[in-house]
Image (spheres, helix red, strand yellow):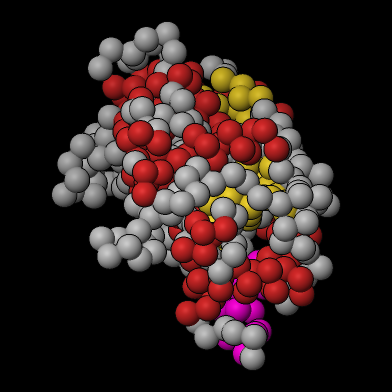
């Protein structure tokens, strides 16, 4: 595919992922329900937006969200937390027409139906500008995040509990369970609060309602300084994070190289350079690596340590923090320890890697030590700048993440 002046990411519509037109006409649910294209409901006094799954039988009959059994459970749980579901909140669904099966019973919406209704959901967010959005269940998760998250989305269990300062929507996104999941776990008016699922759900909701009073953190664009002369690295006097972009996962096979290096010396600045070919030109970097007084941070530090040892012939001195290991210690759920995931849930940046991901993937999927296409990227117009910016952001987010982790760590 020929690349133009703008990248696909820069021109792609949020409501038309991949350029596909998706609308009520292509969905068709509106033809067979009593309350088609259900309007948002609630007085929105505390600017909380709840996004559920889809209207059920009672909602379709009454023309309002949360009118049935699940609505009562949600309303009662919110009341326990001093939030009125209909006075303080606005309520919509990922799909705003009732989906039914061939027998006329409620069913879960399909991803295609959610895609078709997404434009309506995004328009409501743009119009009302909520302070907090409760993402209730998998359908709502797919609606708000699925079209922007380029990797494995997973389910609500992976995402619940995070308060995400989403920089696209400029609001807090708070994913948690749908009330139907809580009801299936054994919660009712007699057993409320006694199941582990219910306790987790209530904790998530309490955290979400508390975050609305915290000012939204606007993202600070860091300075990525691309350098040729590595002597400027002598200016690094404090703790820093560093990151490599390489030709593959492991350094041992012939032809593998460290291609790009970034060092974040502050949360808002990183030096980035292509690895010099001669040891003499690399010497300032070697001095940085081997100085034990310069404490160092990495995401999965064994990667940088191994590549340094094998390809540069030296050991890294002064290791201080591994953000991946720390993430695992804080929360051992699968799928959340990657830097891209953490950059989103902690800082609200959902995608800074899609331009380079394909070039960093192994050419041979069956060989873990296969070369990737990184040099192909460097040959493209602005390829060096694209790679250096990506590498620089990696080290920036590693440093920001390490600082946040250490602020929240419990004393032992």
Q: Quadrant of residue 175?
A: bottom right
Q: Position of residue 252 (x, y in %)?
A: 27, 46
Q: Above or below — where is 248 with respect to 229?
A: below
Q: Quadrant of the N terminus?
A: top left
Kindly report the secondary structure that dominates the magenta region of the rendered protein: helix
Q: Above or below — where is 301 with respect to 288?
A: below
Which residue: 47% across, 79% down? 184
Toward the viewer: 312 or 98?
98
Q: Above or below — where is 1 with respect to 215?
A: above
Q: Is residue 296 left or right of residue 9?
A: right
Which residue: 71% across, 61% down? 85
Q: Is residue 37 left or right of residue 39?
A: left
Residue 97 in magenta?
A: no
Toward the viewer: 16 or 272?
16
Which residue: 64% across, 91% down? 190
Magenta range is: 191-204
Q: Quadrant of the C terminus?
A: bottom right
Q: Position of residue 101 (x, y in %)?
A: 30, 61
Residue 193 in magenta?
A: yes
Q: Is residue 137 visible?
A: no
Q: How many marks?
A: 0
Which residue: 56% across, 53% down? 63
Q: Is residue 369 left or right of residue 72?
A: left
Q: Position of residue 105 (x, y in %)?
A: 35, 66
């Amino acid at each position: 595919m020929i690349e133009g002046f703008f990248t696909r990411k820069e021109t792609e519509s949020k409501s038309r992922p991949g350029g596909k037109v998706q609308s009520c006409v292509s969905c068709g649910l509106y033809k067979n329900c009593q309350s088609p294209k259900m309007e948002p409901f609630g007085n929105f006094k505390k600017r909380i937006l709840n996004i559920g799954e889809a209207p059920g039988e009672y909602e379709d009959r009454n023309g309002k969200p949360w009118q049935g059994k699940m609505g009562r459970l949600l309303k009662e749980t919110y009341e326990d937390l001093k939030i009125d579901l209909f006075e303080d909140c606005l309520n919509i669904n990922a799909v705003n027409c009732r989906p039914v099966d061939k027998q006329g019973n409620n069913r879960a919406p399909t991803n295609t139906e959610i895609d078709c209704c997404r434009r309506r959901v995004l328009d409501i967010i743009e119009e009302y500008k909520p302070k907090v959005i409760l993402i209730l269940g998998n359908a709502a998760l797919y609606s708000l995040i699925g079209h922007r998250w380029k990797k494995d989305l997973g389910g609500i269990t992976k995402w619940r509990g995070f308060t995400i300062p989403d920089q696209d929507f400029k609001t807090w996104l708070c994913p948690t369970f749908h009330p139907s999941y809580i009801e299936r776990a054994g919660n009712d008016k007699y057993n409320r609060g006694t199941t582990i699922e219910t306790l987790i759900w209530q904790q998530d909701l309490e955290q979400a309602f508390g975050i609305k009073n915290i000012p939204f953190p606007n993202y600070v664009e860091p300075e990525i300084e691309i350098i040729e002369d590595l002597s400027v690295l002598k200016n690094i006097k404090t703790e820093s994070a560093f990151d490599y972009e390489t030709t593959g996962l492991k350094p041992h096979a012939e032809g593998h190289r460290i291609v790009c290096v970034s060092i974040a010396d502050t949360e808002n600045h990183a030096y980035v350079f292509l690895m010099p070919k001669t040891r003499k030109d690399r010497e300032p970097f070697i001095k940085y690596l081997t100085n034990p007084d310069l404490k160092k941070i990495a995401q999965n530090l064994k990667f940088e340590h191994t590549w340094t040892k094998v390809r540069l012939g030296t050991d890294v001195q002064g290791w201080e923090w591994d953000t991946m290991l720390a993430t695992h210690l804080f929360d051992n759920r699968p799928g959340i320890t990657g830097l891209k995931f953490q950059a989103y849930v902690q800082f609200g940046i959902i995608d800074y890697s899609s331009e380079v991901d394909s070039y960093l993937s192994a050419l041979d999927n069956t060989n873990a030590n296969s070369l990737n296409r990184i040099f192909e990227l460097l040959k493209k117009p602005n390829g060096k700048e694209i790679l250096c910016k990506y590498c620089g952001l990696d080290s920036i987010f590693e440093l920001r993440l390490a600082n946040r982790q250490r602020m929240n760590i419990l004393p032992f």
